[in-house]
Amino acid sequence: MSADYMLLNATVDPETHRAHVECLVRNESGETWRAAEGFAIGYQLYDAETGTLVVDGERWPTEQDVKPGEAAPVRLDFELPREDGRYQAFISPMREGVCWYHERDWRFLLAEIGVHNGTPRLERVRVARRTTLRRERALREVRRGFTTPFTTIWRNRGLIRVMVRRDILGRYRGSFGGAFWTLINPLLLMLTYFFVFGLVLRSRVEGDPSRTGFALYFLAGILPWLAVSEALGRAPSVILEHRNFVKKLVFAVETLPVNLVASGLVSELFAVLLFGIFLLLLRGGAPASVVWLPMLLIPQILLTLGLSWFLAALGVFVRDLGQVTGFLLTIWFFLTPICYPETSLATLPHSATLFLSMNPMTVLVRGYRAILLYNQAPAWGPLWKFWLLSAAVFVVGHAWFHKLERSFADIL
C-alpha cells in the first residue's frame, strides 16, 4: 500500500516566508481515500539535522473520494520558520485519528528547505520513504563521525596550541629549571634506566650482548608509552579540572583531551631526540629507517585521542576513574614487553601468548624497536590492523564524548 506523486509546482516566497506546493497524488493502495473518514493530505515540518518535529501542519481533505489507481490534485500553502537552519517538509496522506501514512513507510513528497540569514530557499523536492531517510541519516552520521573530529581539531588549532604551551610551562612555573625540565625529565629517566639495566642488573637482549644493548632496547620500547600513559593518566580528570569552561563559557570542550595528547607528544619528542643522541654516541648515528616513524605516530595519536575522549567523558560521571585508570595503566605496562625481552614470553602457555600478541601497545613497541634499533620497516601485517583499530577507537571515542557532553553542565 502506498502513494505516488507528480510534482506540478513548488516555490518559496522569501518575503512572506511561505511555501507553495502543487502536485498530483495517486492512490496506489488497495482502499478508497474518503474525506468523510478523515482522509486528507497534510504536511509536517522537521529539523533536518536532528529529525525533530517542528510543526504538525494543516490538513487538506481531497475534493472527492480517490479510488485505487486514481489521482487527486493537491495545493498546499504553509508558513516556514524564520530561524536559520535546514528543514524538511513531509507532504503525505494521513487519516485523522489513525496515522500519518509516511510513518508506515509510504512514499511521500519531501521538500528540503534552507533558511540562511532569515531568508528561506527551496533546495530540492523529491519523492522519498522513511527507510530511505533513515539510511541517508545513518550514512551522514557515519561520515560525520570520521570528519567532525578532524574539523574540530583544525578549527581550534590556535586554542590547542596556546593551551598546550600553557600546560607545559605551567607544570614547572616557579622552578629554577623552568621549561628546561621538559628536556631534563626524560634525560634523567633514560639515564636512570641505563644505569639500572645496563650497569647494575647487566641485563642482556638476544643478539646484542653489549652492556648498552638492553638499555637501548628498553628505552626504544618506552618511547611510545611515555606519550600514551601521560595522556590517559590525566584524561579522567581533565573535564573536572576545567569545569568552569563547561559551565560558564562557550568552549570547545572536546579539545581538552586533545591538549593532553599534544602535551604527551611534546614529551615524547624530546625523548626521541635524546634517544637519537644516545644512538649517535653509542652506534655512530640514527638508522635511515627513522623515516617510517610517522607510520607509527599517526595511529598512536588516533588511538590515544580516542581513549582520552572516552576516559574524559566517563570521568565526569565516575569520579574514581582516575585511580582505576592508574592501576590499569600499570597492568598494561607490564603486559607490554617493554621492560623484559619478548623472547621471555615463549615460556607462557599458547593462549596467554596469543592474548598478549593482541595488545596494541605491543605493535607500537615492536615498531619503534624495528625502526630505531634494527633499521627495519615495521611489520606490515600487524601495522594495518593497528591502523584499523586506532581509527575505530578514534571515531567511537569521539562519538562517546559527543553523546555524553550534553550532560556535563548538569553533572558539574
Image: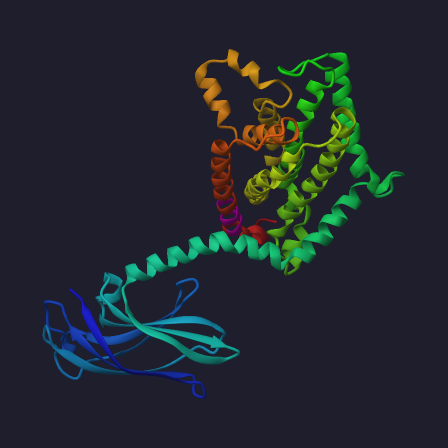
- Above or below, 196 against 159 in this view is above
Please give the name of the residue rendered at 36% of the width and 84% of the height, measured from the top-left corner.
11
Residue 310: x, y in percent?
54, 42
Please give the name of the residue rendered at 67% of the width and 23% of the height, measured from the top-left corner.
218
- Determine which quarter of the picture holds residue 58: bottom left
Residue 332: x, y in percent?
58, 27
Q: Is residue 77 magenta?
A: no
- Above or below, 230 against 251 in this view is above
Residue 1: x, y in percent?
15, 64
Instruction: Report the magenta residues as a range.
Output: 396-402
From the viewer's perspective, is 180 left or right of 293?
A: right
In front here: 166 or 147? 147
Residue 406 in view in this figure:
no
- Determine which quarter of the picture holds residue 101: bottom left
Q: Is residue 401 magenta?
A: yes
Residue 103: x, y in percent?
26, 63
From the viewer's perspective, is 63 left or right of 148?
A: left
